[in-house]
Image (tube, rainbow, N blue to C red):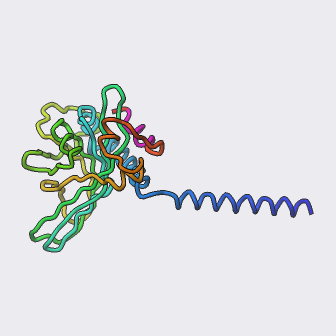
């Protein structure tokens, strides 16, 4: 009888644990999922042999934007978009917590195919960072963007002449074969920032003033800390 009671108790505890785990999984918000994916993308690209100069660019950057999934697809009329995070470096406090943004663009032309890219944008100028914070960032024209060097191997760090406002490091798959972000706009996601940090939260409060924080973003902050 004692054995049966122990087995019943064990079964009850196991069921409770399973329900708790299911509840935790169900509680994963879209914002937290993006933060987790951003960390994975960053760790993947920063250690990628093809992006050996990324650490050097990152150490000179004013800020970084990480987009785990930028989708580009089209049939005659093309478009691209995805959600990502902005993080700003402070000389004394290190990297900020992430603020949420979205990238969107459309284009006309003969396009057939699809592509998904994991992308890190290194923001090199105060002008570009301010444009992001003012919700006025559009790549191309006054806001120059260029592809970061690839294929130089890990530890290259030979960056010398940084002329563009923003550099991109993108790992792509699909049929387009190249990534161009000219004409794309970066817009803040106020609803996501509010959901993650509190109603009415602005990116400035998160990345510059550092008035708010979320402990669940610490893993991403720690990933950037060495740079």
- Quick one: 47 or 35, which is closer to the camera? 35
Give the residue displayed 24% in from the left and 45% down from the top. Answer: 121
Residue farthest toward the front in the current orientation of the protein: 200
219 drawn magenta: yes
Classify residue 160 by image quadrant: top left
Give the residue displayed 25% in from the left and 61% down from the top. Answer: 81
Which quadrant would the C terminus be assigned to in this image?
top left
Give the residue displayed 38% in from the left and 37% down from the top. Answer: 211
Left or right, 121 with reference to 13: left
How many numbered marks are there?
Answer: 0
Residue farthest toward the bottom in the current orientation of the protein: 75
Give the residue displayed 18% in from the left and 54% down from the top. Answer: 185
Left or right, 133 with reference to 23: left
Residue 25 at x, y = what percent? 53, 59
Residue 86 at x, y = what percent? 30, 45
- Quick one: 184 or 75, which is closer to the camera? 184
Residue farthest toward the top in the current orientation of the protein: 92
- Quick one: 171 or 195, which is closer to the camera? 195
- Quick one: 96 or 149, which is closer to the camera? 96
Q: Which residues are magenta?
A: 218-225
């Amino acid at each position: 009888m004692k054995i049966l009671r122990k087995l019943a108790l064990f079964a009850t505890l196991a069921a409770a644990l399973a329900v708790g785990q299911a509840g935790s999984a169900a509680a994963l918000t879209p914002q937290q999922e993006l933060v987790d994916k951003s960390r994975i993308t960053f760790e993947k690209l920063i250690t990628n042999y093809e992006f050996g100069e990324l650490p050097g660019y990152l150490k000179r950057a004013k800020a970084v934007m990480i987009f785990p999934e930028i989708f580009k697809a089209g049939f005659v009329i093309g478009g691209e978009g995805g959600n990502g995070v902005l993080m700003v470096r402070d000389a004394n406090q290190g990297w900020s917590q992430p603020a949420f943004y979205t990238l969107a663009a459309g284009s006309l032309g003969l396009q057939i195919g699809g592509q998904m890219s994991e992308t890190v944008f290194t923001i090199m100028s105060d002008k570009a960072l301010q444009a992001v914070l003012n919700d006025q960032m559009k790549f191309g024209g006054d806001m120059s963007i260029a592809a970061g060097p690839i294929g130089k191997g890990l530890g290259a760090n030979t960056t010398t002449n940084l002329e563009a406002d923003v550099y991109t490091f993108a790992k792509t798959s699909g049929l387009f074969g190249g990534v161009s972000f000219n004409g794309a706009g970066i817009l803040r996601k106020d609803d996501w920032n509010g959901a993650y940090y509190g109603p009415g939260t602005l990116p400035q409060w998160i990345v510059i003033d550092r008035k708010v924080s979320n402990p669940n973003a610490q893993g991403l902050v720690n990933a950037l800390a060495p740079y």
